[in-house]
Image (spheres, coloured by chain):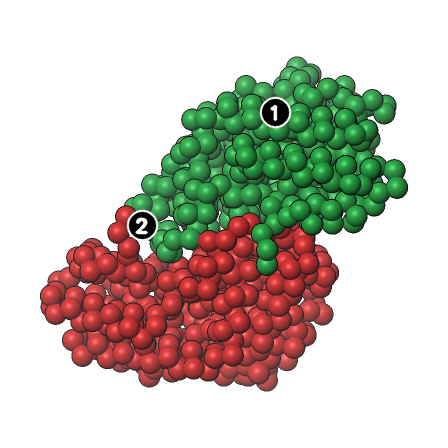
Chain colours: A green, B red
């Protein structure tokens, strides 16, 4: 199989430090070096999430972490609000529904950033929580979570504000405590540049207080007690934990630079695409929104007139690159191109060059 | 960190074909080659589990698969029986309890193989299922599942017989359909010689019929529909799926030889230990049970008089090998030594030599 570089918004090009660890021999998780790595990763992630609370590791996809959080913070019958404007915000609503919560779902246009007013309109005095999506990868939107959380807290101070940070952590500025959030989830196969299989749950002080037992495998209440000792209740994906440690060692001290670089990559992608007349998905009333409302995780464009996704995808593949199509309501109408993974300057230039070539060829 | 070989009953020494795949670049899961690998692994595992039904892949530990199965086959309030005689049979009871089932728990001596009569004694006409453990790694016992299942079915033909095959698949003879079982679980970090993080659920025809939605992330009813197309509902640990395919390609055609070899390794370990006067854990009324009732996954011995586990462990570590201690009720009283992972003849001879040297030194 010839090498295809991933310009997809997860899974992504692996960090070379991760690859090195993952090519090594198996390490046992019930040993001192494994426990140390486990704790170091939790501590580093606390810093990355920006919380005085705790971060727990789960073996599973980001969805596992989402369910663990909903199940651990809310009980069946309790009311939660979910503003839906993409595939991942829809997932919050599905999970909350599957777990028997009283879900107040608000549907908003896909591709349009949420406003504080739209979210406030879903809440009443019986609402116990609101489930938000920071970076909505399916549409390319970065929702203004700090403003939304501030508005929610000013009117409903006791309500828990929960966020999907799967594709914003390590890519956009994020701080659980400073943004007024109570809990958030993320996963290994995005900004951390690891393979999929490890998920993270960040719990701020208020969320920790309200945590209750849920199910068995996804029981954060139990994990919290066990992980305090550097263990996990069940065999963890220890190889990914060790790889996470190796990447965090270099990623965390340079995080500001990393965010700048990723933001620069995003601007370059949009400049190339918009320069060729492509229409960005993140927009309001047909007008593209400012860069602050576009997620650094991926650029998202409507397909150009007369060009199908398959033709576009194949033009990239012919050059050794893979892009992603639209999801959910946008399937068949959009495409997404991302430099979320490991892209040192030369690799990034190569990716921009491929994008330009493909547009040159097809438009 | 100097290289320490794992003589532990999971995680284990990796298969070199797995290591090769895992050192490669990231592959995207929503692509034709990934879908083909996903389906090939499911087909190969169907053969390994020995069922005409289906095998589903879950990203998580074996425990995730256990919960998915209990939640997918039984509803809160329904009666299930769990004979407990080790840490992993106890886990079945805990899961069933956490999910609100009516659990009839029978406690039997740890280290003693279950008899069909003991299991039958837990059942009545309202029992909907029985949760069994094939290889009880915590005690070294291999339970006679075929005999137990036959006895159960002859008296209670409609009851579902569910098995934990986490450390018996690829190590002891196993056939879901032929042994009269309805469903079973296994994981990647045992006989398949992969890192932890991928779990398998085998569903026989009767279990497939009774499958119902459960939760969200561990919902087998949904996975069944999605996996029929070579996808999974959520981002899978695709790197482990690809590694599984590489290992299964060589493991499955030589499975009979593999079982013989593992059985030979086990006999050799017990011969060395018993020759030095060590007492095997698998026993009945103080008398060691025949080899057929000892799991090929690990040899388990009581600690010799006057020798603590730490001293034994350190003597192995000084020679570059790691063993495991006792679990649960046997913690501090037993030790376990396993050649479950990848041990070609020279590596196996090395392991036997280390075991002999350590006993020579300490006894």
Per the image, label 1 sits on a secondary structure element best described as helix
Q: Which residue occupies 68% across, 58% down?
A: B32
Work out whether disc 1 and disc 2 sit on a shared chain: yes
Question: Residue at (30%, 80%) from the top-left corner?
Answer: B267
Question: Residue A37 at x, y = what percent?
Answer: 37, 41
Q: Nearer the viewer, residue A324 or A52?
A: A324
In 3D space, how far apart are the residues under numbered discs 1 and 2 (Cα atoms)? 42 Å
**Would you identify the image quadrant in which residue A101 lies?**
top right
Q: Is residue A213 visible in this depiction of the protein?
A: no
User: Which numbered dot is residue B8?
Assistant: none
| In front: label 1 or label 2 | 1
In the displayed structure, B36 sits above or below A320; it is: below
Front-most of residues B292 and B109: B292
In the rendered view, would you say B110 is above or below A50? Answer: below
Contact check, label 1 and label 2, Cβ < 8 Å:
no
Badge 2 density bin: few <14, some 14–19, many ≥20, Cα 10 Å: few
| Protein chain holding label 1 | A
Q: Is residue B297 depicted above or below A288 in this figure?
A: below
Compared with A39, B313 (above or below) is: below
Label 2: which secondary element: loop
Q: Position of residue A318 (x, y in %)?
A: 69, 50
User: Is B76 in front, or is A251?
Assistant: A251
Q: Earlier in the sequence, mark 1 or mark 2?
A: 2
Estimate the x, y position of residue A137 in percent, counting from the top left.
Answer: 68, 36
Q: Position of residue B25 (x, y in %)?
A: 53, 50
Q: Dot 2 corresponds to which residue?
A: A31
Residue assigned mark 1: A264
- Depth order, front residue of A78/A220: A220
Task: Give the quadrant of residue A147.
Answer: top right
In the picture, measured across the screen, residue B69 lies left or right of residue A102, that is: left
């Amino acid at each position: 199989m010839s090498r295809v570089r991933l310009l997809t918004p997860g899974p992504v090009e692996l960090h070379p430090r991760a690859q090195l660890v993952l090519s090594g021999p198996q390490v046992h998780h019930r040993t001192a070096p494994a426990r140390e790595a486990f704790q170091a990763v939790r501590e580093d992630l606390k810093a990355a999430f920006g919380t005085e609370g705790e971060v727990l590791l789960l073996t599973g996809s980001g969805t596992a972490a989402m369910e663990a959080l909903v199940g651990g913070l809310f009980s069946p019958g309790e009311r939660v609000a979910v503003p839906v404007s993409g595939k991942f915000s829809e997932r919050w609503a599905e999970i909350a529904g599957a777990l028997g919560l009283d879900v107040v779902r608000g549907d908003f246009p896909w591709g349009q950033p949420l406003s504080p007013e739209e979210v406030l309109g879903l809440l009443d005095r019986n609402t116990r929580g609101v489930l938000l999506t920071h970076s909505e990868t399916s549409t390319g939107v970065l929702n203004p979570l700090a403003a939304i959380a501030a508005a929610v807290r000013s009117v409903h101070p006791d309500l828990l504000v929960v966020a999907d940070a799967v594709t914003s952590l390590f890519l956009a500025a994020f701080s659980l405590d400073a943004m007024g959030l109570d809990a958030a989830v993320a996963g290994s196969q995005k900004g951390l540049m690891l393979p999929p299989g490890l998920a993270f749950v960040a719990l701020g002080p208020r969320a920790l207080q309200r945590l209750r037992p849920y199910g068995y495998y996804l029981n954060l209440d139990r994990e919290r007690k066990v992980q305090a000792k550097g263990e996990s209740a069940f065999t963890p994906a220890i190889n990914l934990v060790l790889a996470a440690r190796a990447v965090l060692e270099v990623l965390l001290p340079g995080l500001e630079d990393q965010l700048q670089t990723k933001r620069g990559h995003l601007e370059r992608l949009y400049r190339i695409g918009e320069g060729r007349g492509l229409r960005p998905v993140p927009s309001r009333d047909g007008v593209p929104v400012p860069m602050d409302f576009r997620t650094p995780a991926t650029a998202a464009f409507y397909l150009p007139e007369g060009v199908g996704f398959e033709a576009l995808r194949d033009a990239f593949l012919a050059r050794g690159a893979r892009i992603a199509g639209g999801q959910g309501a946008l399937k068949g109408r959009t495409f997404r191109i991302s430099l979320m993974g490991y892209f040192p300057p030369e690799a990034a230039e190569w990716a921009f060059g491929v994008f330009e070539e493909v547009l040159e060829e097809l438009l």
